[in-house]
Image (cartoon, helix red, strand yellow):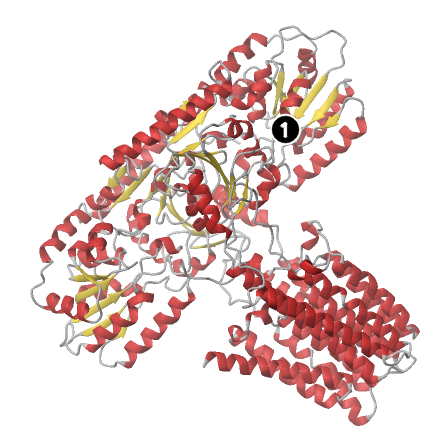
Amino acid sequence: MRRGRPAIAAVRFGQDSSDVVDLALVALAVLGAVVGLLLGSWAVALLAAVPSLAADVLRGERPARLRRLRRVLLDRPERSLVRNGSAAAAVAATPPMTEFTNLAFLLVTVMAVHLALTAYTVLGVRRTQREQAGMTWRHLDVAGVQEGPGPLPDPVQDRLPIDGLRLLTASEVLVLAGFALAAGGVRVVPWVLALLVLAVALAVLWTAWRAWGPHEGHRVRDSDVSVTQAVADLAPEVVFYFSSPADGTYALGVWASVINALERPVLVVLREAGHLNGVETILKPTVVAPTVAHLLAVTPPSVRVVLYPTNVVRNDEMIRIPGPMHCFIGHGDSDKVGSFSPLNRMYDEIWVAGRAAIDRYAAVDEGIDLGVLRAVGRPQLADIRRAEPAAVVADKRLTVLYAPTWEGFFDEADYSSVAAMGERIVAGCLAAGADVLFKPHPLTGHRLPEAGRAREAIDDMVRRAGGGSEVVAPTPNSLYEAFNRADLLISDISSVITDFLASRKPYAVSNRRDVPDAEFRAMFPSSSAAELLGSDLSTLPTALADAAGADPRRAQRETLAEYLLGPEGDPMVVFLREIDGFVERADARIARMAGA
Amino acid sequence: MRPVLRAGITGGLGLAYLVLLVSAVVPLPILFLVAAVVAVGMELVLSRRAPYLLPEALNTGLGVRFRLLSLDVLTALLAARLLPDAGRIVALAIVAVLLLAAGRDVALVFGRRLRWRLNGGPVSWRNLDVPGLPAPRSTPPVPQLDLPFTLLTLLIPLGYAIGSVTDKYGAAIAAQWIVIAVVVLFLAGRFVQYLVLNRPDADVREAVRAAIEQAAPEVVLHHAGRRGTVEQVLLWVPALLALERPCLIVVREPTHLDALDGCGVPVVWAPRSQDVELFMVASVDLALYPSNSTNINNHLLRVPGIYDVLVGHGDADEPESGSPLARMYDEVWVAGALGRERYAYPVSGVPAAKVKEIGPVRPPTPEPRPSGPRPTVVYAPSWEQVADAADLDSLLTHGEQIIEALLARQDVRTLFVPAAPTGSRVPAMQELAERLRRRVAAAGDDSATWPPERLPEALAAASFAVVDVSPALAEAVRADVPFAVPAVRGLDAAAMHAEFPTTQAGFVLGGYPQDVFAALDDALGADEHAAARLALGRRLDASDEFTGRFRAAVDQAIAVQRRRRAFARPAA
């Protein structure tokens, strides 16, 4: 295989995040040096350098938005340079007169630390490139280990409770102390400190060289080979393939119960390692395959069917692999554009909840063969309690669930009420004496900052309201638990309203562009049994009254629920039977191809 | 040669900075100035001419920004060592050098921003009149080091050098004040310029959208690909012009823009998926995709209300010309029966009804030129493609042997025609192509390297061609040139024939140079594959009458889409 240039991630190995906070701390150090020079006091200069050095040693994750203006930020070597340079200049030009050799030796030490840090990074990057350990796994027996492979082990950390890069950065503390002593007129000791720093740098480099260099102190990890073997041994027939933006992991989470219930050998393939933090509920073998080569390695010939919960560009890479059959299962059923995207033509089958979805495809006529559509129900809704007709007790305090969708990847897919109406909806419900459960879509604000701001404002409003009002946490089942607590749902065109119909409780849908009611309901059949909230919210009192008992649409919701949510019966059993059928169809196709 | 040069330059640079360190601490201001001049000179030349000559580590940990910053910091230290009793002057030095460093960074930021605006940012366009906006123009990349600012770095060291000679540091103080003034004035000027030139991104996008609406395109050609792949678009331009319908070309990388300037069809560059959505005005009925090897096609495919057709860019047995992914298009248009077989259901999953034969899209056949006394042979290798899995090129593995074999034959003239994107993914490919070009030129006579767009002309004059499994093979068949295909991936002739059926109508090269000689002798003599080539040509193209068929297919697709449209694209 040809090797290109190292990936950016590898080059940035061991480098910290340089952001505006770091820049401000360096500015403080420079300011200290200037003030120290004007006052003739070296102590001011050295003290001002301490916060910046401390931040570099104790570096941690800070929000990404602090990292704007990349070009004018200072990376760690540059920060150290400016910090130590200003300190040295201040020490040299303030009384008492500093001994030349002390200063020179300390400066050479600073440069030596830089070189050591660079060498350490280069060694680490080279090692990562030689390793074959790109695939992370969970719940899979890879040579006896159930999860791995973890980050590159640090040779310094084998012996000390600190990693090599941090130790090298921390050794600058001694340089700073050396400047202080030199400025104070102490002899010899600064020399000793500088020699100590050089010794630390050499020791760290030596350790790294022994561990990562040609001596093979640390074994070159090749877990990818074992993962490939473990997957081949597992011989999965069903693959759940998942790729999405970082905060979209929930779309796989909704399938956890189905994945765990599958008796056929199943493999979950993630394309981005970040999703591992959101799929703890999945207990079946899971592998992260970042590149196409990895993907090929974990797609053995045993794979019959691949199921896709999202409709993203990277699905193409799996579909290019010939052999298995591909099925789009989505992560919720709604009248959104994404639920009938022309792109879905690329799948062999498209599974939808109920007949409504099939009618939707038929109506838009985007060239999708209706024969590939199957109504399979919504196994995720097994735990939603169905409300009895007229079960509402008079004078009970109402609970309203406000669960809006996000603004979509492009304007045409934007059905969200958050930015335009969200704050007014919640304020209206609270004013009417209801408790509000607020469950924003996890991607809210991903594309439009104003949606993110509105979401924060609503969060505040709900938290301040107290009582039974609360912001629902984004845990896997929290939405369905909130369904069971709510008397009324207010939401947007999205899968939330479809799923909520399983409870048969009243719901209201936002219509922020004020499309005439009849036209809106025709365009979005899932809203046909709902109260519609126009941009002026004039119908909000009616919606609240429905929830309090005056409920004229109950029968309509019964009919609509079946139309949208698919076949009656235990939805989990129905779905698992569908997977069996799909595997049989895939087998039949393989037989046909072999015969052809 | 390269490693020695690299070591020498790295050593020289390292020595210059070491001298700077020593001469700042001692202090030796005149030596410092000399070392600074050397260091700045080397940095300027290297960053502009040969940044690749520096080792990787110097570009990651100790990059040019770090190095020049260290020059600045050492300048302040020099001041402190020279004037240990003048705290104010040293403080001024620190402020001046750090402002200068910031000024260098900001000059680059503004320079890039300005260039981006001139190029049309946040989008760009060609052959389209956008009212209220100046036509975008391509400007050269902004150099990493701003020349005036980098030279300004030398002013303060000069001041101290003068000071050390005259023993009066007025010049140094003046230099520091000048630097501060220049940086502050420059930043203020740039900021004002930015305010004047800046306009909201959304306004630019809306203006371009309005211009597109005005042009009301019905057919869109969507292209994404590496540098050089714009030839896939150019292939289709005459066909689009012949449609006599308003058309629009959407490219996803700005590198294609200049090649399409003046081609007669409006072109827009849409960097983000949202831009694609924005530019798809209501008049668009049909989208054509010349390549299937890029996932970015999805961005346009998912826009509802448009009929999507994969049209490709020439026929070949390449893996992508039969990918199951082709299902995501409404239809796949191929040249002839051979193309149809590649997509045959159920192996790839494109139903036969969705594959349409429209004949070959080709550049106009050139007039055959009177050739020299010797017959012409052509070597036209493919490029490395976007991934190793799809790579079928022979250049890297056998290119040298093939060229040497052809040049060794005194009885023929050799034309080397590498594909346009060669080297866009694998730099070694570009270096090799360059080396072979020099080799061919050194051979003298009338042998030559021709640019990729002259391939049809080369084939029209050729008596024999060595091609890869690529559109060039189909072109050789269409020009009725006897051809040979170098075996790749360790396959033998039988395996090549099985994997890539089009190779059956020519020789498969396994041994060098003897197989090249054998195939060439046959081409100049018996031509044993003549019948097979003719048969392949018949299956390759449904008909020579491309324009009419293409036009009819477009008309039909647009009619279907307009029927479908009743519901799609709800008014947002």
Which residue occupies the foreground of this view, B251 or A312?
A312
Q: Residue at x 76, y 64 (%)?
A: A170
Q: Position of residue B177 (x, y in %)?
A: 79, 77
Q: Residue furthest front?
A: A144
Q: Residue furthest left?
A: B526
Q: Chain of mark 1?
A: A
Is B487 positioned to the left or the right of A186 in the image? left
Q: Residue at x 53, y 20 (%)?
A: A526
Q: Position of residue B81 (x, y in %)?
A: 82, 83
**Residue ID for mark 1:** A404
User: Looking at the figure, which quarter contains the N terminus of chain A?
Assistant: bottom left
Q: Is residue A360 above or below residue B116?
A: above
**Secondary element type, mark 1:** loop
Is A100 positioned to the left or the right of B560 in the image? right
Neighbour tally class for label 1: few under 14, some 14-19, many 20 plus, Cα within 10 Å: many
Identify residue type, mark 1: Pro
Is A271 positioned to the left or the right of A403 in the image? left
Q: What count of labels does the image hold?
A: 1
Residue B117 seen from this side: no
Which corner quadrant of the image does residue A109 belong to? bottom right
Q: Is residue A443 above or below residue A504?
A: below
